[in-house]
Image: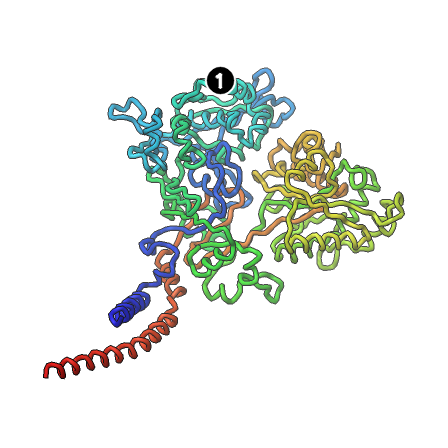
Amino acid sequence: MLAKYLKCCVYIFILTTSLGCGEGSLNSPYPNAEREDNTLYTSFSERPKHLDPARSYSSDEWIITNQIYEPPLQYHYLKRPYELMPLVASAMPEISFYDKNDQPVSEDDLSKIAYSKYRISILPNVLYQPHPAFAKDNKNQNYLYHALTEDEAEEYDTIQDFEVQSTRELKAEDFVYQIKRLADPTLNSPIFGLMSEYIVGMNTFRDVVDQKYKALGASKNNEEFVDFRDIELDGAKVLNDYQYEITVKGHYPQLLYWLAMPFFAPMPWEAVKFYSQDYLAEHNISLDWYPIGTGPYLLAENNPNLQISLVQNPNFHGEKYPAEGSEEDKAQGLLARQGKPLPFIRKVNFVLEKESIPYWNKFLQGYYDQSGISSDSFDQAVQLNPVGNFSLTDELAVKGVKLQTSVLPTTFYWGFNMLDDVVGGLGEKQKKLRQAISIAFDMEEFINIFQNGRGQVAHGMLPPGIFGFVEDSFNKVVFEDSPTGYQRKSIEQAKKLLAEAGYPDGIDPKTKKTLVLYLDAVVGGGPDTNALYAWIRKQFKKINIDLVVRDTQYNRFQDKMRNGSAQIFSWGWNADYPDPENFLFLLYGPNGKVKFDGENASNYDNPKFNILFEKIKSMRNSPERLALIEEMLAIAQEDAPWIWGYHPKLYTLSHQWMAPFKSNAMSRNTLKYAAIDVKTRSMLREAWNHPILWPISIILAVLLLLIIPAMLQYWRKTHQKMRLDNGLKK
């Protein structure tokens, strides 16, 4: 018994001693061996569904794919407005224009342009990351892993299990191969519909591929796949090893923006062949799990139940930190690393975090390097200073945390269904009804209450940073001039418009009762959703309109939007690329949701707006284009098909060991620009996370108090026995 007590005390003493000199390692969620690693720690909440560049289109996927795949172009990291520049292209594409007789024409003569050709030259000596798809036998003739048997495939659980991994040089045919994959009917690429409208021969190519798949049919085995190299696509041609050409219908300058997305990154045929093996797919060894690229990082671990890890690509062709930026960039230290080789960080760990509170607590401890600000942690992160701006709380300021804010190229709004009998139509009365509601809907209050002030009131479709957005311009239908700038029009003015719309005091002349309108919303539930609905009803009640919220399951809500049975709804749009066309098309008549299954969810169709859109959609940015855009905005503001909502603000927190970093809403390939002072991070983590030893000390003291009586009792028994033994001997 005594021996057990003594052994326990020894264990506790050793543990206490190790905690006191263990440099905080027992508190860390990461292995102690990683303390000095040049690793960026961030998180993910759900497994990225698609890492195949032909299919991937969500932000949680792009944060990974954009570090691995390299399309021809990218956005300059620092320049604003956003500017395209070459990535693996050796120069910006050469663009030429032709009429219907294949004769060259000037870009200025838009009416004669039948199609445009983009000639793209790529960098030589660019290598793919190491990958088993390129591995060949000793004679360099046959691919080692392109025709695995079922038994052989059983040996591999991850891409790292393949012993032989090799590479090859990037070629122009890889870009053409990927463009063809966008038309693959088995992949259902989300941009096929749009690209088929522009890239010549896309639909024909898809039909040919579909027939080949059908011919393969039931006879398809593990060694067969449809090789797109054998099928011609008129709109994408290989010119030589380092040049290819894309041909599009008409004049479509927005193609340049698409050339900066992973959809147009290269894909080697060897990878498609390798991943086409059914036996590998059964082990989740596929493009959706293991991408293959030429970028600065490669995917080293994909464990959706724990973490996803990127490490530096040993074959990366190299890139330099930009030397151009604004004076503000220079003042913030963003040009201090100009000319230095990228990437700066060796490894990026995305750790699974399903809840925001554990993530936030780990950020405060220094175990995550950057963080957004959730509603749960907003008051802990920022406070309103005396001049009405948000600043860091004292707790974060003391830790040296840095706050960066930026307005996202996103627009959220509440839309009216323009096909609805009550709120729709372009007549004066219907127009004034929508205008009255737009005035009553206090967007400033909404942002303060439900977005914690993280938003900018929208006056039109275009968010800041997009050509056509004018900082000091405002919606003259909803706002008016004031001595301090502009302010929202009064409720009295809204009621006057409502009366002119035929609803004096909000009374419906048909029913002689208060006008009732309907907001169709996706089922949310919870106190936050109920509070939001109550607030929205209050806005309508300001002008004596009753609002009924119809909660709907998501699929049913989608059906309502498609068949036009929704009356009022909330919607949003995030820029695919920084061009006004990408927002203005949301109100283009031929893009209507009901008639054409387009993105014009409100089904707005104003002939004047449509004509102007046709003019500006293919124009390059110029004073003439700006004047036409301003005319379009004025038309839309007058018609009020939307309750103009807000543009969200992004708040990013970074620990002091993170080098200055600039948010780039158009680009997701920016991890290569991030840098960490690893020694400072290690030192501060240790300082912030000393183990709490007093509970163990108390336990040790209690055990000692228990041991002392036991020792005394043991001594008495032993001493008594010795005396008894001695007595017997005598």
Who is closer to the viewer here, 13 or 118? 13
Quarter of the image with the N terminus is: bottom left
Residue depicted at x 51% and y 49%? 663
Residue 609 position by quadrant: top right
The residue at the point 57 percent across, 31 percent down is: 253
- SS of the residue under disc 1: helix
Q: Nearer the viewer, residue 114 or 654?
A: 654
Q: Does the rendering let one see residue 308?
A: yes
Report whether 341 appears left or right of 379.
left
Query: x, y percentage for residue 240?
Result: 41, 22
Q: In the rendered image of this protein, does residue 258 appear above or below residue 507?
A: above
Q: Is residue 396 above or below residue 329?
A: below
Q: Say if 446 sits above or below 595 in the image.
A: below
The residue positioned 10% from the left and 81% from the top of the image is 729
Q: Say which of 469 and 682 sits in front.
A: 682
Type of the residue with mark 1? Lys
* Position of the C terminus by quadrant: bottom left
The image shows residue 54 at horizontal and vertical percentages of: 49, 31
Decide if residue 346 is on the left or right side of residue 670.
left
Residue 26 found in image quarter: bottom left
Q: Say which quarter of the image contains residue 720.
A: bottom left
Please name the residue that numbered disc 1 is placed on: 212
Specify how the rendered protein is coloured: rainbow
Residue 292 appears in the picture as rendered: no
Decide: few, some or many residues near mark 1? Use Cα within 10 Å; few <14, some 14-19, many ≥20: some
Tell me where residue 406 appears, x and y as whole percent: 56, 51
